[in-house]
Amino acid sequence: MFTFPKPKTASDALRQAKVAERARTLFSDGSYYWYDCGNGFYGVAKKSFDVIPDTTYTVVLMPAVSCSCPDFREHLDFCKHTVALWDALEAMDEEEQIERIEREAASCELETTGCDRYAEF
Ligand SMILES: [Zn+2]
């Protein structure tokens, strides 16, 4: 999960709660999508569902979080795009890790299937 900075004021805390809440469903509700631009750059875009092009923001997560949206430019700490992308990438990494473990387990089974370790007895 994205780690928010410690809020200094009540309005900071409120903003964090709002951003976290919105970020949670940003991609899953279908209103936004993201793509990998390479070299650590990502695009987070809001679907316009119209003839006008989608609104796209450029997001960087490492070594420091940044986004080209007005909210981030104003506060320079986080925004719904950076938080949502962070969590999306983290979730993907977990899935990939699980897949890798399952693949290794499957290949391990294949390797041992033909080998009878009690053959000499
Ligand atoms: Zn943003």
Image (tube, rainbow, N blue to C red):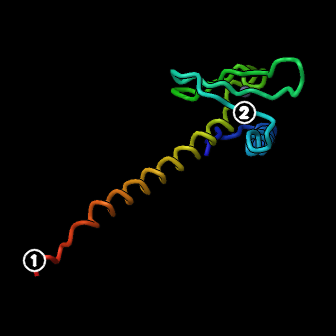
The three-letter code of the residue at mark 2 reads Tyr
Quadrant (top left/top right/bottom left/bottom right) for the C terminus: bottom left
**Residue 100 located left or right of residue 74:** left
Mark pair 1, 2: CA separation: 59 Å
Q: Quadrant of residue 70?
A: top right
Q: Which mark is residue 33?
A: 2
Residue shown at 58%/39% (left/top)? Answer: 89
- Give 66 or 91, whichever is nearer the viewer: 91
Report ligand 1 position as a quadrant. Answer: top right
**Depth check, front residue: 102 or 70:** 102
The answer to whether mark 1 and mark 2 are in CB contact below 8 A is no
Q: Amino acid at mark 1?
A: Glu
Numbered tag placed on residue 120 in the rendering: 1
Direction from residue 31 to residue 109 in the image, left or right = left
Image point (48%, 54%), residue name: 98
Q: Disc 1 vs disc 2: which is toward the camera? A: 1
